[in-house]
Amino acid sequence: MKGKHPKYRPYKQPAGGWGAAAATAKVLMQQSVLTKGSRALLSMNQPGGFKCPSCAFPDPDKRQTLEFCENGAKALAFEATKRRVTREFFQAHTVSALRDKSDHWLEMQGRLTEPMRYDPGSDKYVPVNWDDAFALIGRHLRGLDSPHRAEFYTSGRTPNEAAFLWSVMVREFGTNNFPDCSNMCHEPTSRGLPPAIGIGKGTCRMDDFDVTEALFVIGQNTGTNSPRMMTNLVEARKRGIPIVAINPMPERALIEFTSPQDVVQMATFGHTDIASEFVHIRLGGDLAFFKGMMKVLFERDAAGEQVLDHDFIATHTTGFDAIRADVEAQDWDEIVAHSGVGEDQIRRVAEVYVRSKATMLCYGMGLTQHQRGSQLVQQACNLLFLRGNIGKPGAGIVPIRGHSNVQGDRTCGIDDQPSQQLLDSVEKVFGFAAPRQPGHNARRAVAAMMAGEARVFIGLGGNFVRAVPDTERSYAAMRGLDLTVGINTKLNRQHVVHGREALILPVIARSETIVTSKGEQALSIEDSMSKVTASRGVLEPASPDCRPEVEIVCRMAMAALPRTTTGWAAFAEDYDLIRDKMEAVYPEMFARLNEKLKNPEGFHLDVPPRRREWPTPTAKANFLVLPGLEVNDGVSDDRMLRLATIRSHDQFNTTVYSNNDRYRGVWGDRMVLFINEIDRTARGLRVGQKVGLETIFGDGITRRVDGLTVLDYPISPGAVAGYYPELNPLLPLDYRDAISETPAAKSIPVRVISDVGAPD
Ligand SMILES: Nc1nc2c(c(=O)[nH]1)N[C@H]1C(S)=C(S)[C@@H](COP(=O)(O)OP(=O)(O)OC[C@H]3O[C@@H](n4cnc5c(=O)[nH]c(N)nc54)[C@H](O)[C@@H]3O)O[C@H]1N2
Ligand SMILES: Nc1nc2c(c(=O)[nH]1)N[C@H]1C(S)=C(S)[C@@H](COP(=O)(O)OP(=O)(O)OC[C@H]3O[C@@H](n4cnc5c(=O)[nH]c(N)nc54)[C@H](O)[C@@H]3O)O[C@H]1N2
Ligand SMILES: [Mo]
């Protein structure tokens, strides 16, 4: 059965196209929301409507009549589903029984409908009214001997207004314990970019795509995770712009794509070739590749060619000599070995870069989730600085964010290491003493739970326990808490892996209307390119007992802070009042916020590097050296492979829509191991065989996952891949980026344990 397996049928069509159109129709039908869902799709990402709850990629400036993608439609269909989790459902299932169900099964039960409290006597969730739920939270929080014993998690679907109030409530309570989904995601961007360019955000806008002369797409599975960006890639290719895709996996949509919105292309079964140059990089090989490209530039500069922007370098940067010395000291053989890319291809890509007068460098989790992820992001900046590719049209650094409002949440104060300036401002506006010491990020929150220091966990959205590393130990730590609270739309793992007491609080979703005594309320969202827009739902809330996130935060604050003078009750009714306070805390950034949000097109936040102003300590853009060629520590084990934990086409993070991964050709199974044929045969493994993986970490803890089906896949040698979150038990909490503490989920050192069961 060489190379073949019933669960693996390589997808030969272009990505997108009729496959995507069919998948969109199917998902709406399955969730029984064909008419309701289609109606809502018409308002999604349109002026006056709501922002897509899926990813953070911006809407186009030039509008299409239907502005959504297959995965946006999926996110909406699963949100607008007709299925409901009711009190009868909880009556029929003990929590122990629910724990045995898969993530997909939990998700498929539908929307949460009323607040529930865990009853240890029956091992079931039972109804609780909202007042009693808040009273229980208030009792626990007020009873702690230190505010630092509570962890306040945020997931990136939370809108700006709720995130802002959450940050105020937690600081008034007395801690900066803000574990956030971005701590596992683009934290290397938030911590890596400021020393380099002075701001932890990208520097491009959508119109830069129209004038760019070269695009790099690095470590990002665009067709699955930011499908709306495919429109920009297609348009760029139609203009003849080169696209360099750098990835250890030849992701289908980066090779060929049919735009579902392109009527002619659909009718003629045509497609657009996306990558003009596909770089099949070694996993973790990007550092060596960047240095290889820089080496070519320095060589050509030394030979008298005009390949560097010396004006930009002299006027705007520091550290050029050090970076040059570091790069020139690297040996070509080493660069090739560490990047896995031939010198000829590195030179060819460097030539693409040299020919372009404006280059955009887009990246995702393939760059950030490594042990030196933050510094790797800085190396990408070095490459851009060499040709003055920041602060001019069509050029810049472009982190592609994940959750639809993950960037906004950070902008609105969700930060475990807030600046003293922000805290001063919060104190001035609200009149309480803000805690000055740094709090816990996601990793530290889990560590505090493991150590027994944390007693309470409250999650504003998300599925913390399933998203974090070290599944088994994290589950145990969660179960040791006094109280766990999940503020969610859907049932998920964190509700069934809970503390001594536990609450489920159901919320109104992004696509649904929020009506208070002051009338209908709008929210605001910031996309990956710093554009802030109002979002107004159009559908009826899933249940009359679902509450808006803003109201939940306000009532929790009133229960937890008996002496508060903050206007929580008023905020819950009138969201304009919240935005007034946002403006007061951030007077420059959010000046005239309420007024500006009336423009249906939204507005861009200021990004100083766009005009070549650098808010760094040197007031310059800084070249920063990362010595050597490796982004991950060496491991002395010759059987070692590097495991990347990745997303399938049919999931949104821990939400599993189905067990298929269309573009990678995987059907009906998520427990698979993508491995290169060379590595497979070297280990004597057969395609279809079931194997286990074991982490090599050396801290005495055994981390192992069994039951993975071996598939031959064109992933670069030395690397294997499998799905998150199923493989999170293999990821050690302390295997992380040195600066940002982001788990290094793309480079886990593992060993294959074979012969666990027969081939199927
Ligand atoms: N439909 C859908 N959309 C989503 C999400 C979802 O789950 N589903 N999640 C959202 C979130 S929160 C996020 S953060 C984003 C995530 O979006 P992506 O950043 O695309 O995330 P991943 O699927 O984790 O993998 C990224 C890619 O990195 C590649 N890679 C792995 N290691 C390396 C490496 O060493 N070098 C390079 N160059 N590449 C490497 C993998 O092969 C893969 O193609 O998407 C967001 N959008
Ligand atoms: N091994 C490994 N681990 C990873 C990653 C990886 O690539 N590999 N990726 C990491 C990344 S990039 C991220 S961002 C994290 C994701 O971590 P999280 O953000 O915690 O996880 P999600 O799966 O996105 O959360 C899904 C839940 O959010 C709730 N929800 C959905 N919409 C709303 C809403 O509008 N309001 C509220 N209140 N709740 C809502 C639903 O109940 C749903 O079950 O995981 C990280 N973990
Ligand atoms: Mo993310």
Image (cartoon, grey):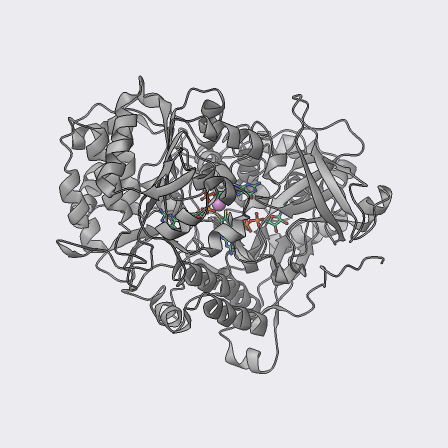
Q: Is residue 144 left or right of residue 406?
A: left
Q: Residue at x 45, y 20 (%)?
A: 452
Q: Is residue 340 left or right of residue 189?
A: right
Depth order, front residue of 101/597 = 101
Residue 546 in sight: yes
Q: Is residue 307 left or right of residue 94?
A: right
Residue 275 in sight: no
- Vertical order, 389 against 319 (above or below): below
Depth order, front residue of 377/197 = 377
Place of residue 400 in the rendered image (x, y in percent of width and height, measured from the top left): 49, 50
Quarter of the image for residue 243 reads bottom right
Q: In the picture, which quadrant includes the C terminus?
A: bottom right
How many marks can you see?
0
Place of residue 277 in the rendered image (x, y in percent of width and height, measured from the top left): 67, 58
Quarter of the image for residue 239 reads bottom right
Q: In the picture, which quadrant includes the N terminus?
A: bottom right
Q: Is residue 274 left or right of residue 156?
A: right
Quarter of the image for residue 45 reads bottom left
Q: Residue furthest top?
A: 145
Place of residue 569 in the rendered image (x, y in percent of width and height, measured from the top left): 15, 41
Depth order, front residue of 371/734 = 734
- Vertical order, 508 against 29 (above or below): above
- Vertical order, 261 against 125 (above or below): below
Q: Residue at x 63, y 35 (%)?
A: 730
Place of residue 236 in the rendered image (x, y in percent of width and height, measured from the top left): 53, 65
Depth order, front residue of 37/58 = 37
Q: Residue at x 53, y 54 (%)?
A: 651
